[in-house]
Every structure is written in C-alpha cells, then in structure tokens.
Image (cartoon, helix red, strand yellow):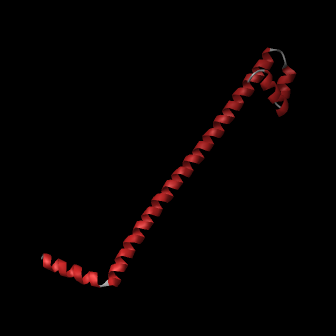
Amino acid sequence: MSEEIDALVDAFNEDREWVNRVLTYEQETEMRCRRAREEALEQGIEQGIEQGIEQGIEQGIEQGMDRLGALVGRLIDTGRLDDAKRVSEDAAYREALLVEFGL
C-alpha cells in the first residue's frame, strides 16, 4: 500500500503543471483568508473608532449641558436674570460667564 502511495506521489511530483496548480490554489486560498482577516480587523477597528467618537460627542454634549445648567442656576441664585437670558443666546458672553464662575 505504501509503495502505491509513493508511486502516486512520484507521478504527481513529475507533473509540474499539476503541482503548480495545487500550490497556486493553496497560496491563493491562504492569501484570501489573510485578506479576510485583515478586513475584519480593520472593520472592527473602524467600528470601535466610530463608537468612541459617538460616545465622546454624547459625553461632550452632556458636559456642556451640565455647565450651562450650573451657570444658569448660579445666575438665577445671584439675581442676574438678564444675564441668564443673554447666555442662552450669546455664545461669547456665555463663555465669559463660564470663566467668571469657574465653570
């Protein structure tokens, strides 16, 4: 039995066209698998980056709202109602008052 296998191996090894075709197929399959893994990794990284950006934006909005709420609360507590209205409309003034109140 092993002699038959050896004979077949020898015969196939002599057929260079067949050997090249088999090796090429294996190499192509390996390259496709490698590419698929790389693409999956890139997509995973891209999705992670997108999720991180979305979370960062949400946190930034939440922090901005908290700062504005704290500012308006302090303005109301100090009786500065006109300033409270103005900070809702004037971004530069709002920034100045955030600095003034250490927010």
Can see residue 56? Answer: yes
| 87 left or right, relative to 11 | right
Can see residue 89? Answer: no
Residue visible at 34% across and 76% down? 22
Which quarter of the figure is the N terminus placed in? bottom left
Residue visible at 40% across and 69% down? 29
| 5 left or right, relative to 17 | left
Residue that lies at the very extreme toward the right in this rendered image: 82
Q: Position of residue 33 (x, y in %)?
A: 42, 63
Q: Position of residue 5 (x, y in %)?
A: 18, 77
30 or 89: which is nearer to us?
30
Quadrant of the image occupied by residue 18? bottom left
Q: Position of residue 90 (x, y in %)?
A: 85, 32
Residue that lies at the very extreme toward the top in this rendered image: 78
57 or 8: which is nearer to us?
8
30 or 83: which is nearer to us?
30
Vertical placement of 45 versus 69: above or below?
Answer: below
Number of numbered labels in the structure image: 0
Q: Position of residue 7 (x, y in %)?
A: 18, 81
Residue visible at 86% across and 28% down? 86
Residue visible at 78% across and 25% down? 99
Residue that lies at the very extreme toward the left in this rendered image: 1
Vertical placement of 63 versus 5: above or below?
Answer: above
Which quarter of the figure is the C terminus placed in? top right
| 73 left or right, relative to 28 | right
